[in-house]
């Protein structure tokens, strides 16, 4: 059994402090602690239920659900991926544009899941769709970068460099292969279609959100 965990971009360092990426991580942690203290009722109240959205109810949850997580492993995995890819994309966009991009990616991702299962009463939650948008943007913006990654194969653990394009494309192909999982398992599962929707949004719109003044800064490496 093996896994690869991206840690950071080994090819560049952000020229600006990633304030929004850090803020998003803090908000997610604070909300998760609120979940832990207030219990299941809190999670159900603020998660997206596709059938409710289709019926015109609880539309605010399309926004709130992207800051909820189902477990410690869920939030830890999402925040590690966000920290690996987020600072560079925030650097390329600027804080305001990155904020809009992240929220839009999360909204598109959750709406993709709603459209895929409009009659589902299974709550949907998590930052994965928004982070998938960030990964899509990273693939388009820095396809030649290498990611410092944690490689785990059984008891073998090593930090190594992996091409970002390879890591992201393999991840996306796995989402495509598993896209039917949630549709077939009505009691829950991974929202692969949300990941796909977010990723496509990020890849298609990344250039629209980039700040040319930041891309053109002296010493910028592409």
Image (tube, rainbow, N blue to C red):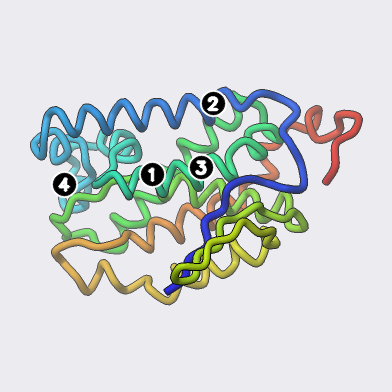
Callout 1: SS: helix
Q: Quadrant of residue 8?
A: top right
Q: Are marks 1 and 3 in contact (CB under 8 Å)?
A: no
Q: Which residue lies at the image location 59% right of the left edge and 60% below the top edge?
A: 158
Which residue in the structure is indicated by mark 4? 52
Callout 4: SS: helix
Q: How far apart are the alpha carbons under marks 4 and 3?
A: 29 Å
Which residue in the structure is indicated by mark 3? 82
Q: Which mark is residue 20?
A: 2
Mark nearest the camera among 2 and 4 is 2
**Which numbered disc flags the more N-terminal residue, 1 or 4?**
4
Mark nearest the camera among 1 and 3 is 1
**Which numbered disc flags the more N-terminal residue, 3 or 2?**
2
Which residue in the structure is indicated by mark 1? 76
Callout 2: SS: helix
**Which numbered disc flags the more N-terminal residue, 4 or 3?**
4
Q: Quadrant of the N terminus?
A: bottom left
Q: Position of residue 165 (x, y in %)?
A: 67, 62
Q: Are marks 4 and 3 in contact (CB under 8 Å)?
A: no
Q: Are marks 1 and 2 in contact (CB under 8 Å)?
A: no
Q: Position of residue 60 (x, y in %)?
A: 26, 33
Compare residues 58 and 169 and report the one nearer the observer: 169
Q: How far apart are the alpha carbons under marks 2 and 4?
A: 31 Å
Q: How far apart are the alpha carbons under marks 1 and 4?
A: 29 Å
**Which numbered disc flags the more N-terminal residue, 1 or 2?**
2
Q: Which mark is residue 68?
A: none
Compare residues 4 and 136 and report the one nearer the observer: 4
Q: Residues within 10 Å of mark 4 (few under 14, many from 20)?
A: some
Mark nearest the camera among 1 and 2 is 1
């Amino acid at each position: 059994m093996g896994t690869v965990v991206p840690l950071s971009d080994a090819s560049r360092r952000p020229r600006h402090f990633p304030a929004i990426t850090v803020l998003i991580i803090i908000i997610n942690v604070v909300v998760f602690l609120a979940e832990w203290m207030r219990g299941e009722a809190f999670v159900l109240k603020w998660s997206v239920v596709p059938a409710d959205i289709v019926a015109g109810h609880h539309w605010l949850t399309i926004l709130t659900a992207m800051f909820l997580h189902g477990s410690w492993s869920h939030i830890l995995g999402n925040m590690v991926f966000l920290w690996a890819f987020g600072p560079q994309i925030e650097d390329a966009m600027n804080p305001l544009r990155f904020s809009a991009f992240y929220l839009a990616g999360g909204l598109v991702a959750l709406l993709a899941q709603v459209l895929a299962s409009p009659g589902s009463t299974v709550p949907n939650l998590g930052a994965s769709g928004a982070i998938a948008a960030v990964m899509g943007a990273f693939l388009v913006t820095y396809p030649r970068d290498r990611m410092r990654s944690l490689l785990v194969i059984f008891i073998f653990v090593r930090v190594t460099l992996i091409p970002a394009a390879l890591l992201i494309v393999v991840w996306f192909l796995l989402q495509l292969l598993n896209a039917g999982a949630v549709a077939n398992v009505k009691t829950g599962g991974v929202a692969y279609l949300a990941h796909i929707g977010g990723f496509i949004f990020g890849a298609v719109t990344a250039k629209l959100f980039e700040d040319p003044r930041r891309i053109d800064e002296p010493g910028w490496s592409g």
